[in-house]
Image (cartoon, rainbow, N blue to C red):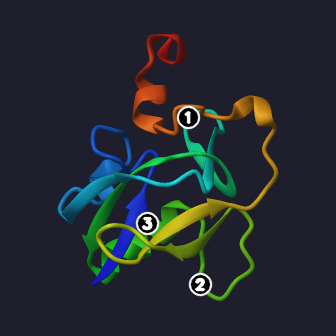
């Protein structure tokens, strides 16, 4: 079993949640201000530069589910990351893997609330 912390399209109620919907939700938490969440259009990018607290859901997932999520995120173990890299973070539910965006992102794309679900579902964004 693996634990993953998700902050974007894999969260409950969002379009990629189907990949992990049969997995066990361990809980939801808000990180300290050690990350920054940015919009990349229809999905977010997480950086480790510490401007915001970020809302995350932690799941316990089977190996096959973890591999499907790796594929979604363009992550291949042992290969240099071109889009997302995977790191382990401490959560209230134990250590979990999270995907970190590896390219630069302009500051004007910062999601100040740190909550992708709310940001994505805002009427201004959805229209």
Q: Position of residue 28 (x, y in %)?
A: 29, 53
Q: Could you classify mark 1 by the number of other residues whose Cα lies within 10 Å: few (under 14), some (14-19), or many (20 or more)?
A: few
Q: Which residue is mark 1?
A: 42
Q: Which residue is mark 3?
A: 69
- Residue 39 versus residue 32: which sits nearer the camera? 32
Q: Is residue 72 above or below residue 17?
A: below
* Mark seen at residue 52: none
Report the side of 27 relative to 46 (left or right). Answer: left
- SS for dot 1: loop
Q: Position of residue 58 (x, y in %)?
A: 32, 62
Q: Is residue 74 above or below residue 115?
A: below
Q: Could you classify mark 3 by the number of other residues whose Cα lies within 10 Å: few (under 14), some (14-19), or many (20 or more)?
A: some
Q: Could you classify mark 2 by the number of other residues whose Cα lies within 10 Å: few (under 14), some (14-19), or many (20 or more)?
A: few
* Mark seen at residue 77: 2
- Residue 52 versus residue 88: which sits nearer the camera? 52
Q: Quadrant of the N terminus?
A: bottom left
Label pair 3/1, CB-CB below 8 angstroms: no
Quarter of the image where one finds residue 47: bottom right
Quarter of the image where one finds residue 100: bottom right
Q: Position of residue 120 (x, y in %)?
A: 47, 28
Instruction: Specify which label sits upstream in the sequence, 2 or 3.
Output: 3
Which residue is pictured at 43% across the width and 45% down the height? 9
């Amino acid at each position: 079993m693996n634990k993953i912390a998700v902050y974007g399209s894999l969260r409950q109620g969002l379009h990629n949640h189907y990949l992990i919907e049969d997995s066990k939700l361990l809980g939801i938490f808000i990180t300290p201000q050690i990350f920054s969440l940015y919009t990349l259009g229809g999905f977010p990018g997480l950086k480790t530069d510490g401007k915001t607290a970020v809302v995350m859901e932690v799941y316990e997932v089977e190996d096959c589910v973890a591999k499907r999520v790796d594929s979604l995120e363009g992550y291949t173990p042992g290969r240099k990351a071109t889009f997302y890299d995977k790191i382990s973070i401490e959560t209230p539910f134990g250590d979990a893997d999270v995907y970190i965006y590896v390219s630069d992102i302009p500051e004007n794309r910062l999601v100040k609330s740190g909550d992708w679900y709310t940001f994505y579902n805002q009427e201004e964004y959805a229209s």
